[in-house]
């Protein structure tokens, strides 16, 4: 008989859409939720959605969402059984797991030892090599300094990938083609890794040309049973960060799919893993696959897998942390149809994807059959400059890839955001690209097929201003005409009643009358 601990209250140590997503899973499981927030997130959606919310510090993540002591203090004060870390911030920080353990708070994620092995990219490569999982040629230890990095790169041969040891998600990662380029990028990449993960250790891998990024969703309980939930195709990346994900992948056939799934389960078993996670691979043009890393957390793109398997991955993760055995067997898991996810960022595609923070003045979310939107914002909410600028994840599901693409094109056309710039036009451009439609993509697809062909829209701002001025003048002219009719016809009976009737008939407001009189 398996015994387990049923959580009553969970602290969500994150913000944005993943905090809302975790709250929703908890609510369906009858678990009370506790949010934490920084100064600029006082009115954020996750704060409003959670059952309780606590302030933890100023806006910079280092002073709030990365403060282990503050988060533990809140968890204790609010009598939480467990902490859900989401992704990013402290999600892969073994010090945070240790702090939870010391205070008898369950960390909803893997055990400390497996996180220690797999959460660090260089240690994970060592373990996979021992377990016989194929890895990309490169280092198994972090570089010591720039001279060490240059020497090793010369030995491996350019191009190389310079990557963060302590995290994933493309943060700090750089494709480097020469020694001079490496000198210019070295400090920049380390600084980005330090800011994202609090850890600036870096390592080097040989860059595989024209690779596909294919990852496998896994789950493994505390009793040694592991399963995979098939793969996600994540080759559409910008600056090494995924922007469009889908499932199934077009890069592999069923035979390779089966081998990758088995390798992923074997990879996490080698580290005695006990949570949900993702095993990432690079796939070359001949369908050879190489281990990249294990993300020891729920992924941004996990809903893609949820749509094709029907399995709630966050609830599965919470159940494993409670000590429950996996509720489903490998042979019971099937892929149905095709799912696509577009990450909607508050960035301006016309200005080299410059962040576009600010107030969301208008918001209309798409809907209809097969459409899902995961978001942490609402009309009137603010996108702050301090954090990842992702505003929403838009997903579509359909019976096959062509139908899922058509549905995504429709959903993007319905998605209206006013007050800030977003990457919706960028996604529309990618989805119209014939190579994308044909599945002819690799991890450099966006850089070579989309961004290089994006031309600044010369004069677009001038045209927009002119169009706005014309529209405003036409509106004023229309108001003037309506006001003239109002004055000519509003004369008999009660002036207040008559004014009310006439303004309603003419589509006027008393404010319009005031402004034009």
Image (cartoon, rainbow, N blue to C red):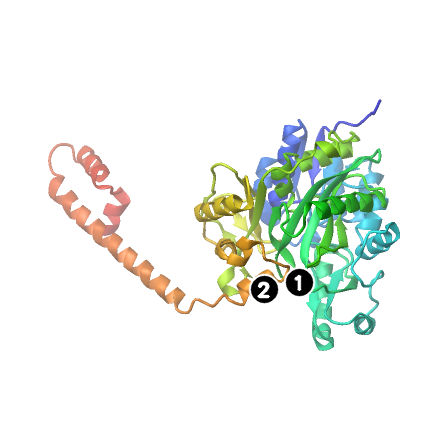
Relative horizontal placement of residue 81, taking residue 364 as reference (left or right): right
Q: Secondary structure at mark 2?
A: helix
CB within 8 Å, label 1 to label 2: no
Callout 2: few (<14), some (14-19), or many (20+) C-alpha neighbours within 10 Å? some
The residue sitting at 60% across, 38% down in the picture is 307
The residue sitting at 72% across, 56% down in the picture is 282
Front position in the image: 254 or 376: 254
Judged by depth in the image, the label closer to the viewer, 1 or 2, is 1
Q: Residue 480 in the image: x percent, y percent?
A: 19, 51
Callout 1: few (<14), some (14-19), or many (20+) C-alpha neighbours within 10 Å? some
> Does residue 223 lie above or below 159 as drawn?
above
For marks 1 and 2 on the same chain, the one whose residue lies earlier in the sequence: 1
- Evaluate whether residue 91 shows in this view: no
- Say which quarter of the image contains residue 74: top right
- Evaluate whether residue 159 shows in this view: yes
Q: Residue 36 in the image: x percent, y percent?
A: 66, 42
Quadrant where the N terminus sits is top right
Total numbered circles: 2
Q: Which residue is mark 1?
A: 210
The residue sitting at 35% across, 64% down in the picture is 463
Front position in the image: 480 or 439: 439
- Say which quarter of the image contains residue 27: top right
Q: Which mark is residue 378?
A: none
Front position in the image: 115 or 474: 115
Q: Secondary structure at mark 1?
A: loop
Q: CA distance from mark 1 to mark 2?
A: 12 Å
Q: Which residue is mark 2?
A: 447
């Amino acid at each position: 008989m398996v015994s387990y601990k049923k959580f009553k209250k969970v602290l969500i140590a994150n913000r944005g859409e993943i905090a809302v997503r975790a709250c929703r899973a908890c609510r369906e499981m009858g678990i009370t939720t506790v949010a934490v927030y920084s100064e600029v997130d006082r009115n954020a959606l996750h704060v409003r959605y959670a059952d309780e919310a606590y302030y933890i510090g100023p806006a910079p993540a280092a002073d709030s969402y990365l403060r282990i002591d503050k988060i533990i203090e809140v968890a204790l004060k609010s009598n939480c059984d467990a902490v859900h870390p989401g992704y990013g911030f402290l999600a892969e920080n073994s010090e945070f797991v240790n702090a939870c353990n010391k205070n008898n708070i369950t960390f909803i994620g893997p055990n400390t030892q497996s996180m220690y092995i797999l959460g660090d990219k260089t240690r994970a490569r060592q373990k996979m090599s021992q377990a016989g999982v194929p890895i990309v040629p490169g280092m198994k230890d972090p570089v010591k300094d720039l001279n060490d990095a240059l020497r090793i790169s010369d030995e491996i041969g350019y191009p190389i990938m310079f990557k963060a040891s302590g995290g994933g998600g493309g943060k700090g990662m750089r494709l480097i083609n020469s020694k001079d380029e490496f000198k210019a990028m070295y400090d920049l990449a380390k600084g980005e890794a330090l800011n994202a993960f609090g850890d600036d250790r870096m390592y080097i891998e040989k860059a595989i040309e024209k690779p596909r990024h294919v990852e496998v969703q896994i789950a493994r309980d505390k009793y040694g049973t592991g399963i995979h939930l098939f793969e996600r195709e994540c080759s559409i990346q910008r600056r090494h960060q995924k922007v469009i994900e889908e499932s199934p992948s077009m890069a592999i056939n069923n035979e390779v799919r089966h081998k990758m799934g088995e390798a992923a389960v074997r990879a996490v078993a080698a580290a005695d893993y006990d949570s949900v996670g993702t095993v990432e691979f690079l796939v070359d043009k001949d369908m050879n696959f190489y281990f990249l890393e294990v993300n020891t957390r729920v992924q941004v793109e996990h809903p893609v897998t949820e749509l094709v398997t029907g399995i709630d991955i966050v609830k599965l993760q919470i159940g494993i942390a409670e000590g429950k055995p996996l509720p489903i067997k490998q042979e019971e898991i099937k892929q149905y149809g095709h799912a696509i996810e577009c990450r909607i960022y508050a960035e301006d595609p016309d200005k080299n994807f410059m962040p576009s923070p600010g107030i969301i003045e208008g918001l209309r979310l798409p809907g209809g059959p097969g459409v899902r939107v995961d978001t942490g914002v609402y009309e009137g909410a603010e996108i702050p400059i301090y954090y990842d600028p992702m505003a929403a994840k838009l997903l579509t599901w359909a019976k096959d890839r062509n139908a899922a693409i058509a549905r995504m094109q429709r959903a993007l056309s319905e998605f209206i955001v006013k007050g800030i710039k977003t990457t919706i036009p960028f996604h529309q451009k990618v989805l119209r690209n014939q190579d994308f439609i044909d599945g002819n993509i690799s991890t450099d697809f966006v850089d070579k097929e989309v961004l290089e062909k994006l031309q600044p829209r010369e004069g677009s701002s001038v045209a927009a201003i002119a169009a706005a001025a014309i529209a405003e003048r036409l509106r004023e002219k229309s108001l003037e005409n309506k006001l003239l009719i109002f004055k000519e016809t509003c004369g008999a009976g009660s002036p207040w009643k008559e004014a009310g009737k006439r303004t309603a008939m003419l589509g006027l407001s008393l404010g319009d009358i005031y402004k034009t009189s």
